[in-house]
Amino acid sequence: MMTERQAKLLAAIIEQYAEIAAPVGSVLLAKLFDVSSATVRAEMAKLEEMGYIEQPHTSAGRVPTDKGYRNYVNSLTLGQSDQSRSARVIEARVSSNADHADRAIRQAVDTLSELTRNLGLATIGDQLYMSGISKLFMQPEFITGENVRGVAQLLDNLEPWLREAAPNQPLNVFIGSENPIGRDTGVSLIISRFHSPFSNDSYIGVLGPTRQSYQKVMNLVGDTGKMLERIL
């Protein structure tokens, strides 16, 4: 059973790792929590035993595992972010194309990709529209050819998988190995279902590294789905 301090420590590791894209060490965490490095190391050892974090071979720091990310995502309380600058930017671009549903959805996808630096995607009728592949592959996780090939395979099979999986929640998050295709490529799919003129089960979302600012991205994707449903 994870203690409250361990949960906060896990959240800090995930959030710091999202920012710096490097394993998080005990010295940084000790400063954040105003405790000794020894205390942090002891708690990190327990988190590692429970499978929530791991130590890369080349670093003394720790990174989250898929299990750690899932625990963190399940603990998030998502609220309305309609007043955020990012949400206002998307709404302005969508509203300017409200009479053309396909253009509005494409604008939403392009803007999501721009704001999150991930690959944006949406279903428009029977087609899957994607934007920002170059942004995805500029992330440090995808420097090596092996990871790029795995992500490319996932993208090739994403449309049939979405039809088969039919995510049934307003906001769905598939983390790393939870993806049935490309499960070893270190990516997460954050996707929102919404009603559109094309289908009652349209989807919009982003595909990016598991190293995500989940609260921000999940709020933005969820609100974008609601926004498209309202405007279209």
Image: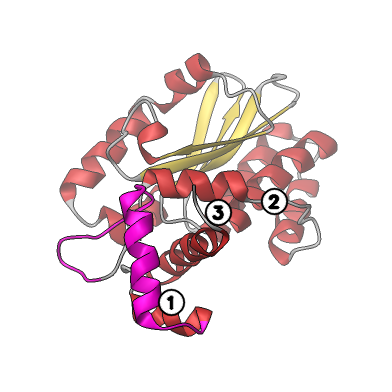
Residue highlighted by disc 3: 214
Query: Counting residues from the N terminus, which is met first, the one under dot 3 or under dot 1?
Result: 1
Q: Position of residue 88 (x, y in %)?
A: 76, 59
- The image shows a total of numbered marks equal to 3
Label 3 environment density (alpha carbons within 10 Å; few <14, some 14–19, many ≥20): many
- Element class at badge 1: helix
- Element class at badge 2: loop
Q: Quadrant of residue 48?
A: bottom left
Q: Is residue 62 visible?
A: yes
Residue highlighted by disc 1: 29
- Callout 2 touching callout 3 (CB < 8 Å): no
Residue drawn 46% across the image and 85% down it: 31
Residue segment shown in magenta: 34-60
Q: Position of residue 196 (x, y in %)?
A: 74, 26
Label 2 environment density (alpha carbons within 10 Å; few <14, some 14–19, many ≥20): few
Residue highlighted by disc 2: 77
Amino acid at pointer 1: Leu
Query: Counting residues from the N terminus, which is met first, the one under dot 2 or under dot 3?
Result: 2
